[in-house]
Amino acid sequence: MTKISGIIAATMSVLNSDLSLNIEKTIDHAENLIEQGCHGTVIFGSTGQAQLIPISEKIELLNKLSLSKFKDKNLIGTGFNSLGETINFMRIAKSLNFKKFLIMPPAYYKYGDIEVIEFYEKVVDANPECKIILYNFEKLCGYKFSINCVKELVKKFPKQIVGIKDSSYNLYKELRFENFSIFPGSELKLLEGLQIGCSGIISATCNVTAQLSRKVYDDFIKGKEQTQNEKLCEVRKIFDKYDLISGLHTFWAKENSIHRNILPPLRLLNEDDEKNLIQSLKHLNFKNKSSMAA
C-alpha cells in the first residue's frame, strides 16, 4: 500500500452569489493548488464549509471531479454528523472510484473512545474498500482522539485506517505505526513533524502557502538547507489571528471577488481585520498570485 504523504491543502469551496456551490471553480481552485505544489487536496473538509453545503451539490461536484486529471490526488471529506449520510456519501464516492476519505467523528453529542471506535466500525463495515484519514480536531467536534483509541482502530482495521490529521496536536509527536500517515494541521508543525517522522501536513492555509510549503517539504526530503520555513511560519501565524475560513476568503477576494461569497453563519473579516491581515502579509512581502511567486 502506498503511504499518503506530502503537502495537502484543505481546499476552499467557491460559491456563487446565490450561495450555491460553483462546481467548476471549486475544482479549478483545487487543481490550481496542486499545480502550485500541493501533493493533493481535501475536498469538503472544514475549510471547504462541508457541513454547510447541501448533499446534492456535493454529489454533483464528485461527478465532475471524477473526470479531473488530478482525481487520484484528492481526499474526500464527508462533513456529516449522520452515520447513514456518511456511509451513503462514501458509497457514491466509491462508485466514482474515490477511495480516500477524511472523516471526523460527529459533532455536538458527548461520547468517548468506545463510541468513536463503534462509529468507525460501522463506517468501515459498510465501505471495506475505503482508506480513512481520521480527523482529530476537538475544537470542531468536541472529541479528542486518544493514542489508545487510534491504536485500537489501526489494530482492527489496518487496511482501512491509514492515517490521521492532527489539528489538536496531542498525537503527532507520539503516534507511530508502520504504513500510517500522520499530518499535523498547521505549517508551524511541518518541519518539526517531518523531523520526527510525520508525513507532511493537511492545512487550510495551504490555500495560500502551497509553493512555500512544498519548498520546505522538498528541501527536507533532499537534505537541503531550509530557506523558506521562517517565512512560511510567519504567514501561518498571521492567519492564525483570525478565523481561518474568514481570513482565507477575505484574502482570496482581493484577487477574485467571487470568494466574498461565504455561507452563513460564516462571514468575511471586518474592515479593520481585513486591513491588518493584508498589511501584515505585505510586510512579509507575501503576495497572492496564480504563480504563488511569494
Image (cartoon, helix red, strand yellow):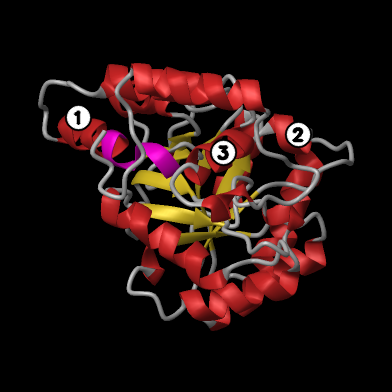
Which-is-in-front pick, marks 2 and 1?
1
Image coords of residue 77 (percent x, y): 60, 57
* Mark 3 residue type: Thr
* Mark 1 residue type: Phe
Tell me where residue 266 sits by quadrant: top right
Q: Which disc is residue 220 wearing?
A: 1
The one of 9 and 168 positioned closer to us in this rendering = 9
Residue that mark 2 sits on: 143
The one of 88 and 268 positioned closer to us in this rendering = 268
Q: Which disc is residue 250 wearing?
A: 3
Q: Is residue 18 something that shows in the picture? A: yes
The residues colored magenta run: 207-212
SS category of the residue bearing label 1: helix
Residue reaching furthest to the right = 109
For the point 65% across and 52% down, the residue is 261
Q: Is residue 233 something that shows in the picture? A: no
Quarter placement of the N terminus: bottom left
Quarter placement of the C terminus: top left
Q: On screen, 20 above or below 218? A: below
Q: CA distance from mark 2 to mark 1?
A: 33 Å
Which-is-in-front pick, marks 1 and 3?
3
Q: CA distance from mark 1 to mark 3?
A: 31 Å
Q: On screen, 232 above or below 88? A: above
Tell me where residue 22 sits by quadrant: bottom right
Nearer the N terminus, badge 2 or badge 1? 2
* Mark 2 residue type: Tyr
